[in-house]
Amino acid sequence: MAEFVLGIDGGGTKLAAVLENLQTGEQFSLSTDGGINSIIDDPEDSRRHLRSMIEDIVILLSAKEGTLSGICIGSASVMTDYEKNHWCEELLSQSFPGVPIGAVTDSRIALEGALRGEPGAIVIAGTGSISLSKDSLGQMKRCGGWGSLFGDEGSGYWIGCESLRAVAKHWDGRGDATLLTDRLLEKLQVSTFEGIIQKVYGEMDRKEVASLSVITGECAADRDPAAMQIVEEAGAHLACLASTILEQTVWESKPLLSYAGGVFRMGEQMKRSFLSHLGPWNSVLTEPHEQPAYGAVLLALRMKEAARY
């Protein structure tokens, strides 16, 4: 039978998986809607979403007449790498008994995928923000990732909140006029600021507030001063995460730096701001090589090799 390893990216809104055939190197990708961040979402919903992915994996393995020899899953619901007895690990072990399984943070698989397992650092800016580094000995460091109450600067949620603040100041007369006002009213399908208050506080979660950053990017592209300022400041915050983690890590040679997350897809101004605030570290910036699910595949391969000794 064909031998496979499995990597799973357990995101907040969807699941992505990669199966790699160890004999041929052929890869198969799967995805399902629904995330597994059980820290902020309903734990039962998270379990249901992972079970759905497992069912698809079992069907694919059966069609390919394959077996699994290693699994790694990365998720925001995992607080430390290789957390023991995590519910993700337990659920996977029920379907794949005897297979080595590791549960790591979502930032870890993003780092491994972006740099193809090489030493270096990554800045991740989606709903939240965090930076992570790995030195040549495999030692890990992190910076940021403190959550929305006292962290996540430069993240999609932070940008969404800053945009709402700019609209509030425009509405009150405390700030200049901004395109964000009309665009956000249209996005939220309300006609008054009171409607925005009811919508944001009564109906929207962190991910929905973070999604407003798309509007901010569009307004920045249209040269709106308030939106451009928010994007500029977001880039500076993310560059601070990057430079801090790079400076705190001991490198034997010049490291690589990459990035991941929806904020970096907001537009060219975001990338320009991030790059301009990196200072001397901008010379080590590189495009991400692989998706996070493939980073999980690389970790699964390492677990498989380690199990041999």
Image (spheres, rainbow, N blue to C red):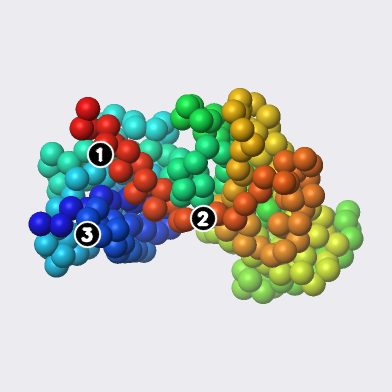
Residue 118 falls left or right of residue 302: right
* Disc 3 versus disc 1: nearer the observer: 1
Q: Nearer the viewer, residue 173 or 154?
A: 154
Q: Which of marks 3 and 1 is nearer the N terminus?
A: 3
Say if residue 202 shows up in the picture.
Answer: no
Q: In which quarter of the image is residue 167?
A: bottom right
Say if residue 183 shows up in the picture.
Answer: yes
Q: Residue 283, how many percent across, how many down?
A: 72, 46
Crowding at mark 3 (Cα within 10 Å: few <14, some 14-19, many 20+): many
Q: In which quarter of the image is the C terminus?
A: top left
Q: What residue type is labelled 1?
A: Lys
Per the image, the residue denoted by label 1 is: 304
Residue drawn at 64 percent across, 26 percent down: 248
Residue drawn at 78 percent across, 45 percent down: 277
- Labels 3 & 2 near each other (Cβ < 8 A): no
Q: Residue 89, how many percent across, how many down?
A: 25, 39
Q: In this view, does 113 lie above or below 34?
A: above
- Labels 3 & 1 near each other (Cβ < 8 A): no
Q: Which of marks 2 and 1 is nearer the N terminus?
A: 2
Per the image, the residue denoted by label 3 is: 57
Q: Which mark is residue 289?
A: 2
Residue 139 falls left or right of residue 31: right
Crowding at mark 1 (Cα within 10 Å: few <14, some 14-19, many 20+): some
- Labels 2 & 1 near each other (Cβ < 8 A): no
Q: What residue type is labelled 2?
A: His
Q: Quadrant of the N terminus?
A: bottom left
Q: Is mark 3 on a helix, strand or loop?
A: helix
Q: What element carries label 2?
A: loop
